Image (spheres, grey):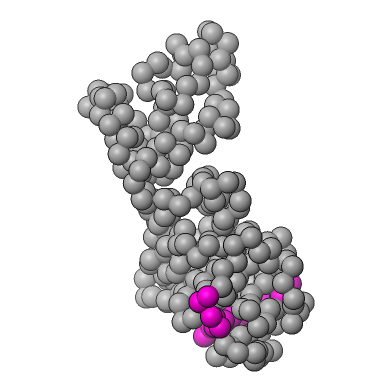
């Protein structure tokens, strides 16, 4: 049914959806789980004349059923929403299984069979540990930050936790995660499958280090040097990319990474079987190990 008897369309307008997601802390209002559904709280959809954000909440399947069987009262749900709005909400998402040929696609640049994808000041954005478990041969851990250096997504042994307190919006639809910052700026977007992570957008900042992925560009650098990669491949390396920061007295607030001076540009390059594919050191030296 596209419309109810009052002519109200089933589809909730996008701006109303965002209000609801924000009020509910971007996950089920009771437990924070994803996936969730938009549930009309007091006035059921077939009786509603308007999509009132005050009267719609996010509920996971379990808690939607508990509401249906009256175990969860409307008052209890409203109380839960009140406490979630100010909380540092966290949502956990477990990658169902991984594959031996798991790879990371950083905006068209492929990193596979490596222990670490990108290492910033000895902290890995994504690291991989091989196991003997046939169901889960690779365990992923890591941490994505945003352009202000805030952690937005924390990964521990294939469990993804999104830190929503400082976000403008967070969505997980069909294994695609997208984060935006307050004000609407894109924060991070990636898709997950058992064969890999496809990073569509990232602007990760730590001190004066930036890691920027967008379209078909991966750009990494500090205040001294910046390297760009297009359609490049990194195989069997301990660390695909290592970057060290020069100073902690710098912020990228308002800086468009596309305007930074580029010192190296790699197009269609292959890096293979080394300690590191590219190492941008503190100071002004870059080591490159082509395959
Ligand atoms: Zn729930």
Q: Is residue 202 rendered magenta in the image?
A: no
**Residue 171 placement, left or right of 39:** right
Residue under the point 46% across and 33% down: 20
User: Which quadrant would the C terminus be assigned to in this image?
Assistant: bottom right
Residue under the point 25% across and 29% down: 76
Asked where in the image residue 266 lies, by quadrant, the reply is: bottom right
The picture places residue 203, in percent across and down from the top left corner, at 60, 63
**Can the viewer see residue 13?**
yes
Q: Nearer the viewer, residue 45 or 1?
A: 45
- What is the number of callouts on the image? 0
Q: Is residue 27 above or below residue 65?
A: below
Residue under the point 74% across and 76% down: 261
**Residue 278 placement, left or right of 88:** right
**Residue 151 placement, left or right of 1:** left
Residue under the point 45% across and 39% down: 22
The picture places residue 276, in percent across and down from the top left corner, at 57, 87
The picture places residue 217, in percent across and down from the top left corner, at 71, 67
The picture places residue 194, in percent across and down from the top left corner, at 50, 61
**Can the viewer see residue 114?**
no
> Which residues make up the magenta segment?
228-249
> Quick one: which residue is furthest to the front in this view?
249
Q: Is residue 81 above or below residue 209?
A: above
> Quick one: which residue is furthest to the left in this view?
71
Q: Is residue 245 rendered magenta in the image?
A: yes
Asked where in the image residue 233 lies, by quadrant, the reply is: bottom right
**Residue 165 placement, left or right of 69:** right
User: Which quadrant would the N terminus be assigned to in this image?
Assistant: top right
């Amino acid at each position: 049914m596209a419309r109810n008897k009052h002519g109200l369309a089933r589809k909730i307008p996008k701006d109303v959806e965002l209000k609801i997601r924000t009020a509910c802390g971007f996950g089920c209002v009771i437990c924070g789980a994803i996936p969730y559904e938009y549930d009309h709280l007091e006035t059921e959809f077939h009786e509603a004349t308007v999509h009132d954000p005050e009267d719609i909440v996010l509920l996971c399947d379990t808690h939607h059923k508990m509401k249906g069987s009256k175990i969860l009262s409307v008052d209890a749900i409203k109380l839960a929403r009140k406490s979630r709005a100010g909380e540092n909400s966290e949502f956990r998402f477990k990658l169902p299984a991984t594959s031996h040929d798991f790879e990371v696609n950083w905006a068209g640049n492929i990193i596979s069979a490596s222990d670490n994808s990108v290492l910033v000041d000895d902290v890995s954005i994504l690291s991989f540990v091989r196991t003997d478990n046939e169901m889960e041969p690779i365990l992923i851990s890591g941490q994505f930050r945003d352009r202000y250096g805030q952690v937005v997504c924390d990964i521990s042994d294939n469990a993804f936790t999104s830190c929503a307190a400082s976000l403008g919006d967070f969505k997980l639809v069909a294994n695609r995660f997208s984060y935006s910052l307050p004000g609407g700026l894109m924060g991070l977007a990636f898709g997950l499958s058992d064969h890999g992570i496809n990073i569509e957008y990232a602007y990760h900042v730590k001190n004066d280090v930036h890691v920027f992925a967008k379209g078909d560009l991966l750009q990494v650098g500090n205040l001294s040097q910046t390297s760009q990669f297009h359609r490049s491949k990194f195989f069997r390396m301990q660390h695909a990319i290592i970057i060290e920061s020069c100073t902690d007295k710098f912020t990228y607030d308002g800086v468009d990474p596309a305007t930074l001076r580029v010192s190296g540009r790699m197009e269609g390059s292959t890096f293979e079987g080394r300690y590191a594919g590219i190492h941008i050191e503190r100071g002004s030296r870059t080591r490159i190990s082509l395959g």
